[in-house]
Every structure is written in structure tokens, then in C-alpha cells.
Image (cartoon, rainbow, N blue to C red):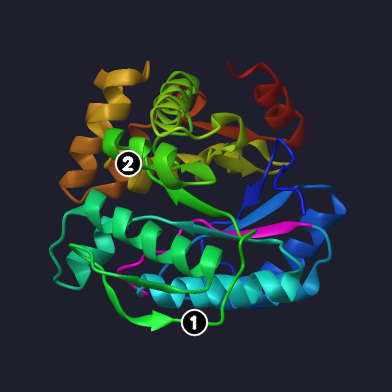
Amino acid sequence: MSRTFESIAIGFGDDPTAHELLELALLSEKEGFGSLWIQEGIQRSPLTLSAAVLQAVRQIFVGTGVTSPFRRHPQVLALEAATLSELSGGRFILGIGAAEASIANYGLRAKLVQAMRDAFKIIRGILSQGICSYQGEVFSLRSVQKHLSAPNCPVYLGDIGSKMLELAGEFADGLLITRRGGFSPRYVKYAIDKVTRSAAIKGRDASKINFLAFLETSISKDRELAGNFIKEVLASYTIPNLPHIVMDVAVTPQDETKAVRSAYLKGDIETATRQVTDEIVDTFAIAGTPSDCLERLSTRK
């Protein structure tokens, strides 16, 4: 089955209930989206939700955007991915990322790039060959895994750091650029170039690597409501932890974003939200009526 997806994929934040997600998935397929991405979140399992969605829809691809090998060992992820791929006729995409917040929450310490390298080697070994034993620096698999093969199950890496981009070029079928980087066309071009250069060095065909960038989006028939909602998201999630690499590469209103971050770090979300100007919204997100958002998508460069 082809791994080429439509130019606009879709994902849903704010933790919709399982039943709401199924309804949204059916609507997404009806409207012609090529792929649907389910984030890890803290309320529900993305893999369980992926199984439910894949049974509900018949054409759309479904991926985790992303889950972490620190939450589920790479062997477990490979088993889950192979099972979901088999159930769906090859429509499942395993998106993985380090998820540093999870590592801190679990009290773990690890070299993140090496951890993801170990994860890819274990997952690739199991999915491609059905047989794998591996001794890694962070993750290992000492017992040989047998009788499992899903060579066509794509594995994507979700991250924005320089070393992780190089790792994507070495191993991944695709790159998922997070919401804290996907807003910037300049950063997206930088990331694609970094991945393709790494792939070339490793002797891989970069034209077979897919690239998806998440973009904060708020759509409502009420333009003001859409704008106010996205300002809260930008003030409490996107801007406060914006990576330095994105700030360095992207063209952003840095003075204004510093004011947002400062208020957030003081625990004053209300002030942080007020500091999000219309210019910041235009830079970091797409918000407004359906026609507003379509126009912004067509002109965003």
C-alpha cells in the first residue's frame, strides 16, 4: 500500500473522548483527509484509540503523533505496530519521539538521541525481519523475537532538534515536526534539508521520506472565538517552551514572545494570554472562520 498521504493531514488536541474521536475520524475520512494523527496525551492510549479508529474508517491512514519508547519498550511498540498494521491492511503509522516530559515524570535519565537510535534499531529489526536481539546503550532486547514481520509498516520520528533530525534521515520513513516548529516555513525548510542531507550521507533515498508539520489551528464560524481560543493555546503551550533552535532559525516577534513566556513562567496564564497579539497569532497559528483558514493556508510561505 502506498505511503503517500494528502497534503493536509489532521490531528485533534484537547483530548476528545474516545467516542468523539471516532466521530471526528469518520468526518475526516468523509472530507478527504489523507491521514489522522493521535497524540499521546495524558488521558487515553493512542494505540488503543488507533485500533478503534482503524476499524471505523476504511481508507484514511492513522498514526501516533507521537508515542514514546520510554512509555512502552521498543519491542512492545513493534508488536503493537505490527498488529495494527495487520488489522488495517497497512494503514497504521508508528510515530515515536523521546517525550522528555515523560522521562522527567518517571524519574528517568537517558541520552535521548542514543535512546531513539536504540529504539529504531529494535523496532526496525522486529518489523522488517521478525527476528531481533540487540544490545543498546539505553534499550536492549536480549531474548530473540521471532515470528513477526510487518516490513511495510512505516515508522516516523517526531522531533525538532538538530541531532534528532539527522537520526530521522538515517532511520525514519517520515518526520513529524512538532507544533513548536511547524508554524515556521523557514524552520520546516531547515528541517527538511537537515534530514535529506543525513539520508544522503547514509545512502538512503531521501525522496521516499515523508514530511509532516503540525500547525496550531482553531476554526470556528465565530472569528473572535477562534482567535481567543488559539491565544490561550499559544500562551500556555506553544510559546513558553519554544526551543532555541526554532527561535534561531525562524523569523518570530521575539520581544513579544518573551513577554508571553515571562508571564507564563510566573504562573500568570491570564496575563500571558493577553500578551498574545494578533501578530503573534498570525505567526504561530491559523485561526478564524473556515474561509479565513483556507486563505491563510493558501498564502502561508
Judge whether 143 appears above or below 231 on screen: below
Q: Residue 121: x percent and y percent?
A: 38, 59
Mark 1 / mark 2, whichever is N-terminal: 1
Question: What whole-number distance in Å separates the C-alpha atoms at marks 1 and 2?
Answer: 29 Å
Mark 1, residues whose alpha carbon is within 10 Å: few (<14), some, or many (≥20)? few
Mark 2, residues whose alpha carbon is within 10 Å: few (<14), some, or many (≥20)? many
Q: Residue 148: x percent and y percent?
A: 56, 77
What kind of residue is marked 1? Lys
SS for callout 2: helix
Q: Is residue 301 or residue 73 the one in the foreground?
A: 73
What kind of residue is marked 2? Met
In the picture of the structure, the residue carrying the numbered disc 2 is: 164
Look at 35% across and 62% down and name the residue there: 119
In the picture of the structure, the residue carrying the numbered disc 1 is: 146
Quarter containing the C terminus: top right
Quarter containing the N terminus: bottom right
Quadrant location of residue 18? Answer: bottom right
Secondary structure that dominates the magenta span: loop
Look at 29% across and 24% down and name the residue there: 247
Q: Is residue 160 or residue 280 the one in the foreground?
A: 160
The residue segment tinted magenta is 60-72
Q: Is residue 208 or residue 12 the one in the foreground?
A: 208
Asked whether residue 132 is in view, the answer is yes
- Position of residue 100 in the picture relative to residue 298 (left or right): left
Look at 66% across and 16% down and name the residue there: 299
Judge whether 247 appears above or below 140 on screen: above
Q: Residue 45: x percent and y percent?
A: 50, 76
Does the segment drawn in magenta span residue 129?
Answer: no
